[in-house]
Image: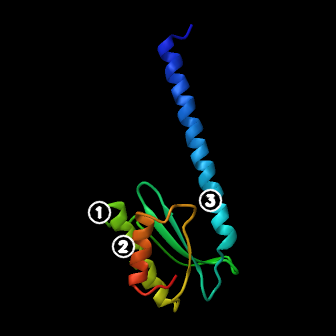
Amino acid sequence: MPTKFYVTRLERLVNNMANLIKKILNQGLRKARVRAKVSGTSLRPRLSVSISNKHVSAQLIDDEAAKTLAASTTVGAKQTGTISEQAAFIGADIAKKAKKINISAVVFDRNGRKYAGRLSALADAARKEGLEF
């Protein structure tokens, strides 16, 4: 027979899982809402940003041709510092890669995230390098 301590712990675990599922579902809904309005072309590709707890990555995507034109990530890079500093590095790097392939304007896809903190640092660094969005 389960003890009261065990039941309380199990209830807390179930409650935490329910909150996590709700959080993931809401982010998926926000992502779908943004993607319904944002689409990239060869002249103005979509700058898609993905941020995890450890890494930051950005891609320039032509949705008409379903091709990735340029990509930059911290995975495997020797970049150190906070995630915000790494995001700024990736923003500057993706802007330099965009200039190499003659792209000056992009459509920003925030992937359902709030435009704050790490995402803002990446966008500001990309703008400083001359990318327009």
**Disc 3 designates what residue?**
30
Q: Quadrant of residue 63?
A: bottom right
Image coords of residue 19 (percent x, y): 56, 39
Residue 22 visible? The answer is: yes
In this rendering, is residue 24 above or below 103? above
Amino acid type of the residue tagged 1 in the rendering: Gly
Amino acid type of the residue tagged 2 in the rendering: Phe
- Which residue is at 37% across, 72% downward? 88
Q: CA distance from mark 1 to mark 3?
A: 29 Å
Q: Would residue 47 appear left or right of 96 to someone viewing this image?
A: right
Q: Are marks 1 and 3 in contact (CB under 8 Å)?
A: no
Amino acid type of the residue tagged 3 in the rendering: Arg
Image coords of residue 65 (percent x, y): 69, 81
Q: CA distance from mark 2 to mark 3?
A: 26 Å
Foreground residue, 42 or 18?
Answer: 18
- Mark 1 secondary-structure assignment: loop
Q: CA distance from mark 2 to mark 1?
A: 10 Å
- Which residue is at 66% across, 63% downward? 33
**Disc 2 designates what residue?**
89
**Disc 1 designates what residue?**
81
- Which residue is at 63% across, 49% downward? 25
